[in-house]
Amino acid sequence: MNHPLFDLTGKRALVTGASRGIGRAVAIGLAAAGADLALQGRDAQALADTVASVREARSSVWVSTHFCDLRDTDGISRLVADVLAEGPVDTLVNNAGMNIRVPALSVSVAQWQAVLDTDLRGAFFIAQQVGQHMVERRQGSIINISSVGGLVALRTGVAYGAAKAGVIQMTKVLAMEWGKYGVRVNGIAPWYFRTPLSEQVLSDLQYYGEVVSRTPLGRVGEVQELVGPVVFLASNAASYVTGHTLTVDGGMSIFGF
């Protein structure tokens, strides 16, 4: 049985980027903690696989799926309207994101725009629309998935770093604006986790060795290790926590890279 402080029974969470990786793990973890789910993604089969995994974790979960490109603000409006037509949203996990690993001198306008539109612009406008609903209800928790790349300089990925730094600052401002309405806004800043997004770079043994050498725990993370922080921030256990970005990085950000 869940500890009462962490019990999400009767709550409903919208998770973006739920098709795979961090989003899938978080969806499964929220369901296991008792939450019903609305899941956003762009890959129908991958999202169906997430639903199957969620139901393995908790067979009684109520779950709906929604397909939307978060670079499209009209699509975001339709997504939020559809989700709210099904019922209230208690937690938004703003997870959808992308990265383009290109040296700064080679970044094109299209590459810059694609990353910023997904990782920052899309994250803001879905937070804005779900936030309006939460402000009206005078309750809710928004969890923005940023990155340690928004806190410290990484060797490539200037657009990603700029977007994720923006997410961290956005988290602070939204927490300031919406706290008086009972809406909490926090972030999580992961380091390297084993996901489809990181698979290619982590398969380079030299690069992998450099990554773990800069990580005090001496390894990369497993996506299940992000479930606890998300459930914590979604739950009553974090009822007095807002405006904070929690690093889940094996200690990397105290070392630098």
Image (cartoon, rainbow, N blue to C red):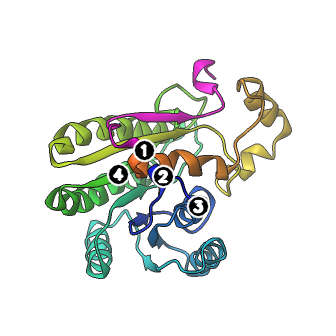
Image coordinates for residue 126, horizontal then vertical, percent? 30, 60
Figure quadrant of residue 71: bottom left
Q: Which residues are magenta?
A: 238-257
Give the residue number, with chain letter if any, for mark 3. 1
Instruction: Check disc 1: other Cα within 10 Å, few if <14, some if 14-19, many if 20+.
Output: some
The amino acid marked with disc number 2 is Phe
Residue at (42%, 78%) from the top-left corner?
66
Q: Nearer the viewer, residue 60 or 209?
A: 60
Numbered disc 2: secondary structure: helix
Secondary structure state at the residue bearing disc 3: loop
Which residue matches tag 1? 237
Query: Between marks 2 and 4, how big is the CA–CA gap?
Result: 16 Å
Give residue 64's mark: none
Q: Which of the two labelled residues, at mark 2 and mark 4, occupies the earlier sequence position? A: 2
Q: Which mark is residue 142?
A: 4
Residue 180 in the figure: left or right of residue 58: left
Image marks 4 and 3: residues in contact by CB distance under 8 Å: no
Quick one: label 2 or label 1, which is nearer the N terminus? 2
Which numbered mark, 4 or 3, is in the foreground of this view?
Answer: 3
Residue 99: give x, y in percent of width and height: 54, 49
How far apart are labels 2 and 1 at the CA level? 6 Å
Q: Earlier in the sequence, mark 3 or mark 2?
A: 3
Residue receiving disc 2: 6
